Image (tube, grey):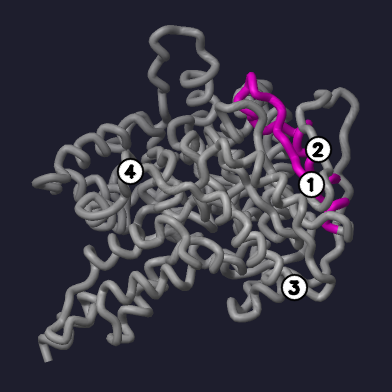
Amino acid sequence: MPLRAKILDPRVASRAQMSTSPINETIKELPGDEPEDVLCNNLYGLRTIELNRPGKLNALNASMIRKIVPRLVEWEKSDMANVVVMKGAGDKAFCAGGDVQALAKKNMEGPEGQKASSDYFALEYKLDHYIATYQKPYIAFMDGITMGGGVGLSIHAPFRIATERTVFAMPETTIGFFPDVGASFFLPRMAGSIGTYLALTSDRLTGANVFYSGVATHYLHSTSLPSLESRLAELRFRDYDDIHKRLAIIEMTIEEFATGLPHTEPLLLGGELRQAIDRCFSKGTVAEVMEALKQEQGPTQAWAEKTLDTLHQRSPTSVHVAHTQMQVARDWSISDTFQREHQIASNFMKHPDFTEGVTARLISKEKPKPTPKWQPASLEEVQPGDDIAAPFFKVSNDVPTLKLLTDRDYADYPYKSFGVPTEDDIQAVVSEGRRTPREVVEHFIRRKNGRQGISTIVEEFLARKTIVNEAGKAEWENDFNRMSEQ
């Protein structure tokens, strides 16, 4: 059966998201759910959800989801709730992922256990989709480790605040899984081939670089977050303010607490490294990616060798699935994304690599940790023409199409203007041919109301992708080369 949600015209995507859509089902706590693993609080117009398993790095489980969803539904309907903040308890993690150890143990019970794991992902993806299409201002404090399931709670938010303690990654290929929780929607939309690089390697971004990459929309010091919460609680919106007006007010409020970006943490995914990432990870097959890495010379050779070693440690099946995912998911709507990911996740629950990877990497008490026995065992075992990813993308009648909590959908993030400038944004301004490099930078600084770090992002793009013509104006390099050839 087809698994396609209606893809909306991007020009009306924001209006579509804000349309009325009834909740399709009721999710509530069950007997036996953990007490106080989620703490909810009201302060004037602010509503907060605090993940409260600091000893487990706030890893997300079904008990937590069954507490979070009813509160979000209640607050979305309430005229008293102005802003929702999602945060984690303790100073180590926002949310380090889903409780994959419990899932791997379930899978060991056979088909019934695998179905239970699939049901968990259904519950998680319903929450993530609901957050991605939420009709109230939603802010994620990505303070500390933000991986896997924690990314699903944050990456689709209009505002995503990184701090000096933020560690972002999608580590799924290390445990025989794939980048899920809506990563199919977010990662392919990252600049160049950065999303594919992060998906295949599980590489980490920390602190300011979570902001520079566009994963976060803002960077604040962690000590500023309590004061920001208090200020958000005081905000008052007029009844006729639409969601974009309210988000603009929140954007200015967040900026009140900016104290500057650390000088000791320069932009990482830029310059020669960024060019190497685009060269290698834009290839059409995993084999071509590997070959491109082998061909790297000069200042990026050491990086390429290290990346090759990293990929050889990952599940070959996961690497191939993630690579295909980054290519085909560009055309999925937000609803498609979670429905497709549920099919893929369910297939992984039946594949030995997930249980093997979680057991070796996380459950085993051996020191050092044992090396997972992947199937197939290595990337070299995958022969040309072997499409080991294809079965994961097939729609199976054994896994019903995921029915999401609402029918809301869009083809592109409706609030992405509140994030950092994208490379498409910068290229569009450069291609007008009317500004010097300094004027391009100043244009985006004004557009972002002086937000810290914007100049760094724009200047890196200009240095990498533009030249200065005889008139002193910035020109996109491809446009300049084309004119020179004529």
- Closer to the N terminus: mark 1 or mark 3? 1
Marker disc for residue 40: 2
Marker disc for residue 201: none
Screen quadrant of the N terminus: bottom right
Question: Who's the residue at 59% across and 76% down the image?
Answer: 10
Quote the CA–CA distance across marks 2 and 1: 7 Å
Q: Residues within 10 Å of mark 2 (few under 14, many from 20)?
A: some
Could you tell me the amino acid type at mark 2?
Answer: Cys
Marker disc for residue 242: 3
Quote the CA–CA distance across marks 2 and 4: 36 Å
- Closer to the N terminus: mark 2 or mark 1? 2
Question: Who's the residue at 27% across and 50% down the image?
Answer: 289
Q: Residues within 10 Å of mark 4 (few under 14, many from 20)?
A: few
Give the foreground label among 4 and 1: 4
Quote the CA–CA distance across marks 4 and 3: 38 Å
- Closer to the N terminus: mark 4 or mark 3? 3
Segment tinted magenta in the rendering: 47-76
- Closer to the N terminus: mark 4 or mark 1? 1
Task: Using the image, determine if residue 372 lies above or below residue 180.
Answer: above
Q: Residues within 10 Å of mark 1 (few under 14, many from 20)?
A: many
Could you tell me the amino acid type at mark 3?
Answer: Asp
- Closer to the N terminus: mark 3 or mark 2? 2
